[in-house]
Image (cartoon, rainbow, N blue to C red):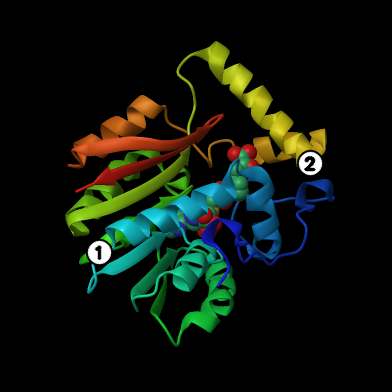
Amino acid sequence: MTNFWDTELYLSSDKDQLFEQETWPKPFTFNEDVVRVFDDMVSRSVPLYKEVVACAVQWTKAYYQPGTKIIDVGCSTGTFLELLGRFLKTPATLVGIDNSEPMLAKAKEKLSGLEDTHHIELICESAGNSSFENSSIVVMNYTLQFLPVHQRQQVLNAVYEGLVPGGLLFLSEKLRSPYPQFQETMTRHYEAFKTRNGYATNEIERKKEALENVLIPLTQMQQVAMLHDSGFAAVDSLLKFHNFTSFIAIK
Ligand SMILES: Nc1ncnc2c1ncn2[C@@H]1O[C@H](C[S@+](CC[C@H]([NH3+])C(=O)[O-])CC(=O)[O-])[C@@H](O)[C@H]1O
Ligand SMILES: O=C(O)C(=O)Cc1ccccc1
């Protein structure tokens, strides 16, 4: 098998040209049009996307406890679960949760090759209603940021409650700096990253408007405080590029 760090993610979608067209999703939502281009959109819009997914796999392999569940909240098209399923040798129960039906339809297709090895469950529900019972791994990459701010603590509380002792939460979020000057510079550098990845200025501006009040970033201090308040004692950050950060938290 290919060396882990040389392996490619299983990405399959059309090119993201949504915000170049006459109409675009405003407010932003994960509808069929977005799902059709999602893998290209996420990999060109999230800094270090491949590295984050790969790190989530490595940490999952390090903290997985046989007989428990591995849950990906906001699993989208199943990219993390697919990479994990290929590299996790012990048969496991892999659970993908997402509230977008078209995302899960895509995930089902992507994960179909792993059904002989792993037990796969795809659940269409809002993370606010999910149970995390008997899980040793909960991955939540760029999903909490889409929940209303007042619901986030309750979801993290439920994750903490559901994890078995020694269990891991791997959380990635788009954050904002509490210092306006840093926030402004970070945004500029993030937009330059999108430009380098082929997005035109009007695409960047339109998407920014569409995401207003939909993707609500917290500061790192607010996010870490929420993790501690839900019960996690050990919380650390693992990767950060501009305003995108990944955290690990152990029960
Ligand atoms: N309340 C909710 N409940 C459940 N799912 C939700 C909710 N709100 C949004 N979603 C789902 O969360 C996912 C967010 S994308 C995650 C990327 C993935 N983790 C990846 O690593 O490829 C990140 C991004 O698009 O920036 C989408 O699939 C939504 O349908
Ligand atoms: O924050 C942004 O500007 C993004 O484009 C991140 C993102 C990536 C994929 C779907 C929605 C938001």
Residue under the image location 44 percent in, 44 percent down: 172
Residue 65 position (above or below residue 220): below
Q: CA distance from mark 1 to mark 2?
A: 39 Å
Check disc 1 and report the residue beneath it: 135
Q: Tell me which label, 1 or 2, sits earlier in the chain.
A: 1
Residue under the image location 20 percent in, 67 percent down: 134
**Ligand 2 placement by image quarter:** top right
Give yes or no for contact between labels 1 and 2 (Cβ–Cβ under 8 Å).
Answer: no
Residue lying furthest bottom: 116
Q: Does the image show residue 132?
A: no
Quick one: SS at disc 1?
A: strand
| Residue 38: mark in rendering | none
Residue 33 position (above or below residue 110): above
Q: Amino acid at mark 1?
A: Ser
Q: Amino acid at mark 2?
A: Tyr
Q: Nearer the viewer, residue 141 or 158?
A: 141
Q: Residues within 10 Å of mark 1 (few under 14, many from 20)?
A: many
Q: Quadrant of residue 129?
A: bottom left
Query: Residue 120: image x %, image y %?
Result: 41, 78
Relative side of 86 to 133, left or right: right
Query: Residue 25: image x %, image y %?
Result: 69, 51
Check disc 2 and report the residue beneath it: 199
